[in-house]
Image: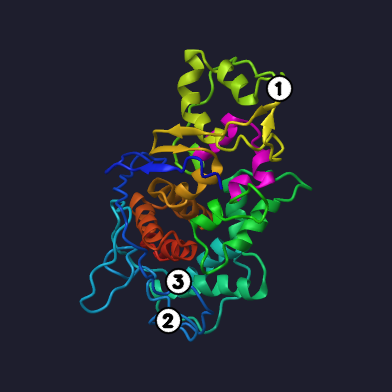
């Protein structure tokens, strides 16, 4: 990791309009004294499911039945677990629940990408959040035990990453990272900042296929703005000439771009787009790492002011900060929830998204807790 200048994160209280719809309110990201202990994190196998949500192999009792959505269960007089982000509103009105058969089909469509598998004969009579959470964890644990991928996670990652869907082009990155997300300990850091074993590559943003799918600084920055920050980016003005891709000795690609977008008609949008894209500038258009460009040392340092104040030297210190960021947690929760709801022809509400985002952030950004929060959302269970 580049330690020359570690990332500095300053999240102000009540940042507004971070998510795509502009209707969510983001709470503060306080100095957090520790990671709460989350019951039912999905570790271990999930056995036969009962009406109470218990199983022979693990607990799913935190699947959404607590008073504060997303908060880990506490017992006795223990103080409540710390709230990391505090997205509001966090709750929505309860309603009549679907049958367990319908709920099973929805979870199957979300995680398996199909509803063709037979419905288990031992489903509980009553659909509860605990039952929904246990069903979802059982599906993920089955794939983990069989060392297979969950097709629904592959579908989500393919769409989220904007990977090509042409015949004969395999979405290798989506398959690779979908398997990583099956680990009960997988978090947003697993996806965005986990070392890959290859020098200079951490997380999915440095995957060669992901990088080559958007080869330039603005294109990479636009993906981060829209997919990690949920901030829409205006389209470019009409008749903007393309930048000459030819290299010039002594002039890096970044320097050429900075000159090309210096006019006012371009600079306002590129000031938003380019900084996060510059964090990946050590990777060329094909996703290959390079130390120099046009004979000059690559400069991947930059800074942003929205939706947080953040300075970084490269993706190696930017990605770990993004992986524990409240705005990114909310945006990612929205993306996962939208996928799960869309495949089932449902529509999530603002409260649905914030409820899931709170559960996600308060569980130290656990992927399994996010899945539980999605399938136990009142709107998903109606």
Q: Are marks 1 and 3 in contact (CB under 8 Å)?
A: no
Label at residue 245: 1
Label at residue 32: none
Determine the secondary structure under disc 3.
loop
- Residue under label 3: 41
Examine the rendered structure and indicate whether residue 326 appears above or below residue 264: below
- Which residue corresponds to the image point at 74% horizontal and 51% vertical from the top-left? 170
Examine the rendered structure and indicate whether residue 66 appears above or below residue 205: below
Task: Say whether disc 1 or disc 2 marks the residue closer to the N-terminus.
Answer: 2
Residue furthest bottom in the image: 56
- Which residue corresponds to the image point at 34% horizontal and 63% vertical from the top-left? 34
Residue furthest front in the image: 4
- Which residue corresponds to the image point at 49% horizontal and 61% vertical from the top-left? 367
Q: Is residue 36 magenta?
A: no
Span of residues in magenta: 204-224
- The answer to which image quadrant residue 382 occupies is bottom left
Q: Position of residue 13 (x, y in %)?
A: 27, 43
- The answer to whether 31 appears left or right of 299 in the picture is left
């Amino acid at each position: 990791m580049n330690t020359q200048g570690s990332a500095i994160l300053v999240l102000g209280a009540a940042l507004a309009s971070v998510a795509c719809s502009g209707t969510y309110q983001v709470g503060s990201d306080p100095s957090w004294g520790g990671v709460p202990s989350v019951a039912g994190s999905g570790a271990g196998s999930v056995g036969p499911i009962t009406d109470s949500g218990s199983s022979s192999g693990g607990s799913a009792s935190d699947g959404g039945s607590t008073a504060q959505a997303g908060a880990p269960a506490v017992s006795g007089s223990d103080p409540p677990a710390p709230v990391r982000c505090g997205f509001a509103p966090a709750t929505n009105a309860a309603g009549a629940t679907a049958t367990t058969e319908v709920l099973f089909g929805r979870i199957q469509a979300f995680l398996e990408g199909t509803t063709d598998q037979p419905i288990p004969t031992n489903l509980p009579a009553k659909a509860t959040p605990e039952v929904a959470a246990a069903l979802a964890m059982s599906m993920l644990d089955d794939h983990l035990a069989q060392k297979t991928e969950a097709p629904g996670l592959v579908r989500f990652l393919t769409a989220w990453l904007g990977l090509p869907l042409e015949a004969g082009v395999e979405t290798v990155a989506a398959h690779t990272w979908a398997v990583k997300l099956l680990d009960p300990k997988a978090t947003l850091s697993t996806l965005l900042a986990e070392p890959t074993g290859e020098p200079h590559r951490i997380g999915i943003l440095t995957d060669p296929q992901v990088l080559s799918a958007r080869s330039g600084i603005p294109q990479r920055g636009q993906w981060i703005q829209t997919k990690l920050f949920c901030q829409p980016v205006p389209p470019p003005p009409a008749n903007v000439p393309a930048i000459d891709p030819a290299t010039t000795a002594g002039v890096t690609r970044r320097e050429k771009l900075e000159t090309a977008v210096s006019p006012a008609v371009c600079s306002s949008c590129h000031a938003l787009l380019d900084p996060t894209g510059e964090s990946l500038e050590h990777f060329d258009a094909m996703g290959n790492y390079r130390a120099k460009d046009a004979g000059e040392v690559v400069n991947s340092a930059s800074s942003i002011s929205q939706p947080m104040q953040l300075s970084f030297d490269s993706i190696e210190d930017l990605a770990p900060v993004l992986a524990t960021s409240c705005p990114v947690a909310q945006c990612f929760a929205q993306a996962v929830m939208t996928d799960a709801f869309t495949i089932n022809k449902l529509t999530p509400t603002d409260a649905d998204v914030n409820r899931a985002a709170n559960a996600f952030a308060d569980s130290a950004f656990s992927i399994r807790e996010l899945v539980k929060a999605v399938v136990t959302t009142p709107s998903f269970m109606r």
